[in-house]
Image: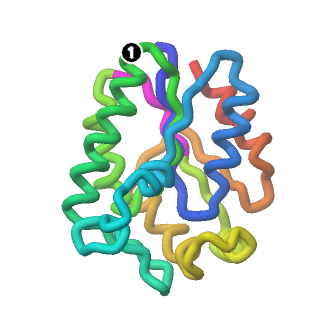
């Protein structure tokens, strides 16, 4: 079956967004990109500050509430509907709940051909990238580096610690059916 969705999971500053851009360049067909950061940016400001939304703690922790989960579920269904309508889709996400996060995606993407990709990065390297970015709370990359992969199963894993985004994208593209 032809791959309809490529889903990348990794911690903050692991290099997912760079891989997505490279995938769009190396894959022969056009692929739409959807990322969790865009969902967070689309939220009303009050949901980035309230208990029911998503909270980014000063120590890098991320806490999500019921209102965020409701909107996240709608977003996931929308991404899945886009793939079902014929567009090829690459998703950049952070499975804060590990296996439970993957299960939510599996439900939304039911019936679609998905390539599950784990994006790993040494926590110290991700933390250095986080500092260089300047748009993340310090500690987020280190806190997420392992927990996002807990109990998650992949078709392929890449490690951006010493491998550039383009090489990772080419490795992923080689697995796209």
Q: Is residue 155 left or right of residue 21?
A: left
User: In which quadrant is the C terminus drawn?
Assistant: top right
Residue 39, given in percent of the width and then of the height, sits at 42, 50
Residue range corresponding to the magenta coloring: 112-117
Vertical relation: 75 (above or below) 78: below
Q: Is residue 24 left or right of residue 99?
A: right
Vertical relation: 131 (above or below) 97: below
Corner quadrant of residue 168 = top right
Q: Residue at x 67, y 69 (%)?
A: 126
Vertical relation: 92 (above or below) 63: above
Residue 119, given in percent of the width and then of the height, sits at 59, 52
Residue 101, given in percent of the width and then of the height, sits at 33, 53
Corner quadrant of residue 121 = bottom right
SS under mark 1: loop
Residue 84, given in percent of the width and then of the height, sits at 36, 18
Corner quadrant of residue 128 = bottom right
Disc 1: CA contacts within 10 A as few (<14), some (14-19) or many (>=20): few
């Amino acid at each position: 079956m032809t791959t309809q969705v490529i889903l990348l999971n990794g911690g903050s500053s692991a290099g997912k967004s760079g891989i997505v851009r490279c995938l769009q360049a190396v894959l022969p067909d056009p692929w739409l990109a959807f990322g969790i950061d865009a969902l967070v940016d689309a939220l009303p400001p009050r949901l980035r500050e309230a208990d029911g939304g998503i909270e980014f703690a000063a120590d890098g922790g991320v806490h999500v509430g019921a209102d965020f989960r409701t909107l996240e579920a709608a977003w996931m269904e929308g991404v899945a509907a886009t793939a079902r309508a014929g567009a090829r889709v690459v998703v950049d996400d952070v499975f804060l709940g590990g296996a439970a996060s993957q299960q939510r995606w599996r439900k939304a993407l039911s019936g679609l051909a998905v390539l599950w990709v784990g994006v790993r990065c040494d926590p110290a390297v991700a933390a250095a990238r986080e500092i260089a970015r300047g748009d993340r709370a310090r500690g987020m990359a280190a806190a997420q580096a392992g927990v996002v992969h807990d109990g998650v199963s992949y078709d392929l894993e890449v490690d951006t610690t010493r491998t550039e985004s383009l090489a990772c994208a080419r490795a992923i593209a080689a697995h796209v059916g």
